[in-house]
Amino acid sequence: MITKNTFKKHHGNILIGLAVASAALSSYAQATNESAMPLTYVSSKAIENNPEVQEAWHAFKSSIYGVDAARSGYLPSVDVSASAGYERRNYGVEEEYNRNTAELSVTQMLYDGFRTSNTVDRFKRIQLIRYFELITQTEQTALEASIALLDVQKFKELVQLAEANLQEHESVYQQIEQSVSAGVARAADLEQISGRLSLAQSNVLTEYANLHDVSARYLRVVGELPLQEIKQADLNEDNIPISVNQALSIAYKNSPTFYASLYNIEAQKANAEAQKAAFHPNVDLSARYGSQDRDELGQNETRTEARVGIDISYNLYNGGLDSANLEQAYQDINIAKYQRDQACIDIRQSLQIAYHNVTILEQKLPALDQHRASSTKVKIAYKDQFDIGQRTLLDVLDAENESFQSTRSYIVALYDRQSAILTMLKEMGKLLPALNVMSDQYPSIEDLTDDPIVHDAQNICPTYDVATTFSRKAFLQKKAKQDNAYMSVTAMPRYLDIPLETNTAPSGEFLDDDGDGVPNEQDTCPSTPAATNVDLSGCTLYSPETDSVEIGIPFSADSSEVRSEYIREVERLADFLKQNPNKMVEIQGHASLDGDKTYNRKLSEQRAFSVAQMLIEQFGIEPNRVKSLGYGIDQPRVNEISVRANAQNRRIEAVITDS
């Protein structure tokens, strides 16, 4: 139950604050350093100018007065009536005279079946609905403005890329034209380069058209044309959750759309309670005092009358109106509940897609970057070889086109990933803090109520990871074999092969793929690292003195999924923690030195988190006893890039400490 209305208690201060906040948006947008904080600048500017934000703003301010109007039911009603008039008649002593009357009445509600109190509660909740709708619209506008800025920057780069590509084609065209004039090259070569030159010109026009369209969208959202010189937008990737379930948990705790749906249910419940008042009597205290200078016969005689009393009224029948209103209110509650469920579904879908886009693009970027770099090298090499007659013109043009397309794909992926991050933050209700936009301009939920809604999101909105319902394992296995040829080196442990190969050794031969001294047929932990103390089943042997253990879990390429054949090793660690409740564990993920540093750190974090989450969710270890960290390439065992070094550096370690 909401126990206070800060906008009533501090009505003047808050309204002044709202007015100051509205004015502050303009000054804040002007004072912000555009080149230092481009996303903050455009978001603030858009929020200041956007009509939908202003509409939500005034709807929120209107709701303040709605609460005041509802609270008026607690206060007395004071009425004054007076009349003065000339009267004429054809009978009586006086045929013409003036009549004057006056009356003062006061009515105070004593009992109305709790209609007033429930109406006040309803409007308080409507006020909170409008507040969260305001935050929702503000975040949506900030998202649209930020993506518009990223799109402008993206297509500016693509215009430059297309123009550079056109210059390359013009250079080749001039070279071929001179060669044809000198009789060295064939006329068909000139026709071929002419066609490719036209395509390059078309690419430039296409990118300019795209830039025009996104600039028009930028103007619509932000309210001004894009600045000519603005610093490249950059996002802090520390805001990216470690898993989609963690992202959903954050969303259900912070999403203004979700909270608006929750308070809508409470508002409809309060309305239903208010409708029940029709089945109760109304009790009022009334007082009245009146005076008139003529009596009913028109005699000049001043009369006064006063009354104080309690009035009770109770409706017995009104055609079923009250029952129908109550049933309608109950159905409105059901509607609100289904709207809440739809909000859950929409948030889950949008966040799943945005988070997956962030993850997929993060995985694609190293490959796209490699493709871009390789295509650029091939383009240069083919051009040099063409100059000495070792490559055909078609080879050069194809290499030029592939270099252009690969660079374009890389640029698009970079910006698309930033847009996906922004969308993810918006669905989580974290976009405004991440952009540092209006952090102190709007009131907080604590300013509006002493008793905010507490909900069990897991029961209301169960989390699902869509990515777990399908598998890219076959593709990743193939990719791993292509990217890691050393997997087939005989000196490496067999368990590193993906997938595990069927054992075809002659009968009776001792096989120990992981080198722990336990034969394969008895080994229930098939990937125990070398030099690890193991028991007769080949799993890590723990003791009270154990402080650091490497957990043998070979992950598939670009994957953080713990495969079923390696869960036993995690289970042994969980058993040890259960037997030693005073112990805590930190799961550390490490990566090899090859590959992108940022990507390796993120992947090591995800792998460590997967093991930690398994300890908590599958084996029941208390969350406060388990931590996970990803170190990436910061703590290599062997400081080099080689077959053996990579195998030793890719690892999961469990550091055990006393609590």
Image (cartoon, rainbow, N blue to C red):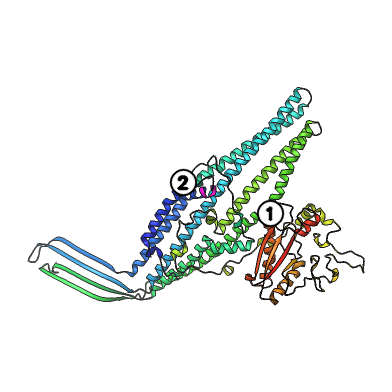
Q: Is residue 74 magenta?
A: no
Residue 487 % position (x, y): 82, 56
Determine the CA span between mark 2 and mark 1. Answer: 37 Å
Q: Residue at x 83, y 59 (%)?
A: 492
Which corner quadrant holds the C terminus? bottom right
Callout count: 2
Residue 32 image offset from top left, x and y in percent: 49, 47
Judge whether residue 469 can be spotted in this image.
no
Residue position for label 2:
30
Q: Residue furthest top?
A: 182
Looking at the image, which is closer to me, 634 or 415? 634
Tag of residue 599: 1
Q: Position of residue 594 (x, y in %)?
A: 74, 52
Q: Position of residue 172 (x, y in %)?
A: 72, 31
Question: In the rendered image of this protein, does residue 239 appear above or below residue 518?
Answer: above
Q: Point out the stretch of residues depicted in magenta.
A: 34-41
The amino acid on which the numbered mark 1 sits, given as a three-letter code, is Tyr
Q: Quadrant of residue 631?
A: bottom right
Residue pictured at 52% horizontal, 69% vertical:
454
